[in-house]
Image (cartoon, grey):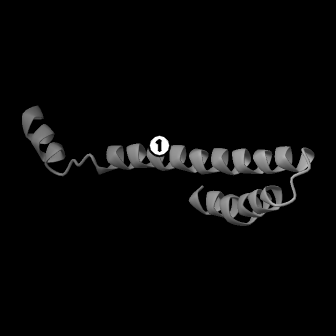
Amino acid sequence: MLEQVDTVFNRGYRTSSLIMTDVNVSSRSRALLWWGLAVLVIAAGYADLARGGETIAPVLLVAGYLVLVPFAILRS
C-alpha cells in the first residue's frame, strides 16, 4: 500500500521550483554586478572631479546617476 502512495505523489513532482531558485540567485548576482558598476563609475567621476576634471567627470557622474543606478534598481 505504501508503494502505491509513493508512485501517486511522485508522478506530479517537478523540479521547476528548484530551477527558479537558481535563476533568482543568478539574477541577484547580476543585479549586484550592476550596482557595483554604478558605484565604480560614480566613484571614478568624483575622483576625476577632485583632480579638476571638467569633461570626463560630469559624463561619468551623469552616466552613473541617470543610467546605471536606475538600471540597477530595475534589475533588483
The amino acid sitting under disc 1 is Val
On-image quarter of the N terminus: top left
Rendered location of residue 23, percent (x, y): 40, 48
Task: Please report the residue visible at 63 percent of the width from the left and 57 percent of the height from the top.
Answer: 72
**Would you identify the image quadrant in which residue 7 lies?**
top left
Residue nearest the viewer, comparing 30 with 54 = 54
Task: Please report the residue visible at 75 percent of the width from the left and 57 percent of the height from the top.
Answer: 60
Q: Is residue 38 above or below residue 58?
A: above
Circle 1 residue:
25
Residue nearest the viewer, comparing 4 with 43 = 43
Residue nearest the viewer, comparing 7 with 67 = 67
**Would you identify the image quadrant in which residue 40 lies?**
top right
Rendered location of residue 35, percent (x, y): 65, 49
Task: Please report the residue visible at 88 percent of the width from the left and 50 percent of the height from the top.
Answer: 49
Q: Is residue 47 above or below residue 3?
A: below
On-image quarter of the C terminus: bottom right
